[in-house]
Image (cartoon, rainbow, N blue to C red):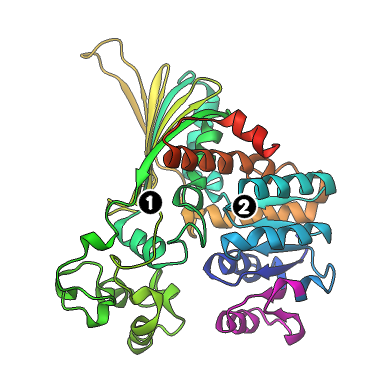
Amino acid sequence: MKMSKLALIGAGQRGNIYADYAYSNGQAEITAVVEPNAERRAIAAEHYHIKPSMVFENVEDFFALGKISDAVIIASMDRDHFAAAIPALDLGYDILLEKPISPNPAECVAIQKKADRLGRKVVVCHVLRYTPFFSTIKQILDSGELGKIISIQHNENIGNFHMAHSFVRGNWRNSALSSPLILQKSCHDMDILAWLANSEAQTISSFGDLRFFRESNAPQGSSQRCLDCKAAPDCRFDVRKTYLPIRGQWPATVVCTDQSEEGLMNALKTGPYGRCVYRCDNDVCDNQVSLIRFKNGVTVSFNLSAFTNKMCRTLKIMCENGEIRGDDSLNRIEVTHFASNQTDAFETTVIVPKIITGSHGGGDSALMEDFLQMLNVGPNHAESRSSIQRSVESHIMAYAAEQSRITGKTVDVDALKMELEF
């Protein structure tokens, strides 16, 4: 495999995961970095040995140089994706694009149409399609051994502490600044559901709200920040409990680069992650239920919730001749063939997919392998599992769910697509 040249737009945690994989495996040179945060920009430049002339604070200065690498990794904040993707395509770049494509569904469609018109490859970071866990489930369904899918129950368990970190205190807490929770967090799940069901969505209804992480639930005597809060000793969200025991690990590494106790405490005194979870400017849901009917008749109930101690996805797929139960945190899949009656023995097979190191159950590394191979093979490379042509559907589904939640009405997905000229 040849050495590809990649430019990194957004040197946060996600962007560095993709760049690090290609760089550390000797498959790519990181030729440039664009990052508005000075500290992250300097760290990336040093780590990837990028010369000073190729280090940029904004995308405009980077794009002014023309095309200087084979592809770009766009892992900036959600609302900045469109402004980076369109000029990148115009310059002839292929793109690895962090999800969501954009919080604006019209922008998602516009990026896809431009990529199609210019013949460029855009791969969206829907890494779950690449995990052995979900790939195994897809293979079972496609084999036909259980017959057609009738219905799916799917749960995304965010984890109470993860919700507090990322979606209450963190970058994705406010839909006006980033995107609605069901788009930012669960376009993954909408994508997986459409992939497993092998169909486009027909109608979507959704219900949810911000139930818990609000000021009315703040403990008596609590204050704006944890480090001077009288209620902190009895609060599980006290930042000393949340971050100090896991120094050097996610999500403490998001708070600051100095992972000493002193460094963390200094960052928590004034930074966003030291705020009371009941007194932030968050507005995204902490629970949401969506009901989906696909065009092939498959029905889905999807539950997104912060009220769990686990960070995982669990699902039950009910087919004509059997069912599949899965828990990706246990890396365990149970396949049951139906019996003739309640007393007869029935067959259940337990499958433990292979384990691949890396985050998202190995999906991140498998995605990068596919992307780098695509760059090497060029136009003859088969369409990526998570090409933008396949990925836009999940974003429209998430947008439809959010519209349904807000309006209280069932959304006809084809009618929505017509509005978006999809």
Residue found at x 21% / y 78%? 229
Decide which of tag 2 and tag 1 comes sooner along the chain: 2
**Residue in view at x 53 percent, y 52 percent:** 363
Residue 52 is one of the magenta-drawn residues: yes
Q: Quadrant of the C terminus?
A: top right
Q: Secondary structure at mark 2?
A: loop
Q: Position of residue 66 (x, y in %)?
A: 85, 69
**At which x and y percent is residue 228?**
23, 82
Residue 371: say if magenta. no
119, 379: nearer the viewer: 119
Image quarter of residue 213? bottom left
Mark 2 Cα within 10 Å, few/some/many (few <14, many 20+)? many
> x, y (%) of residue 138?
52, 34
Query: Mark 1 falls on what kind of element?
Result: loop
Res 393 visible = yes
Q: Which class describes the residues within 10 Å of circle 1: few (<14), some (14-19), or many (20+)?
A: many
Q: Identity of the amino acid at label 1? A: Cys
Give the numbered dot on residue 101. Answer: 2
According to the image, label 1 marks what residue?
A: 285
CA gap between label 2 and label 1 equals 20 Å
Q: Which residues are magenta?
A: 31-60
Identify the residue at horizontal 23%, vertical 60% (top origin).
Answer: 216
In this view of the protein, can residue 333 be seen by the observer? no
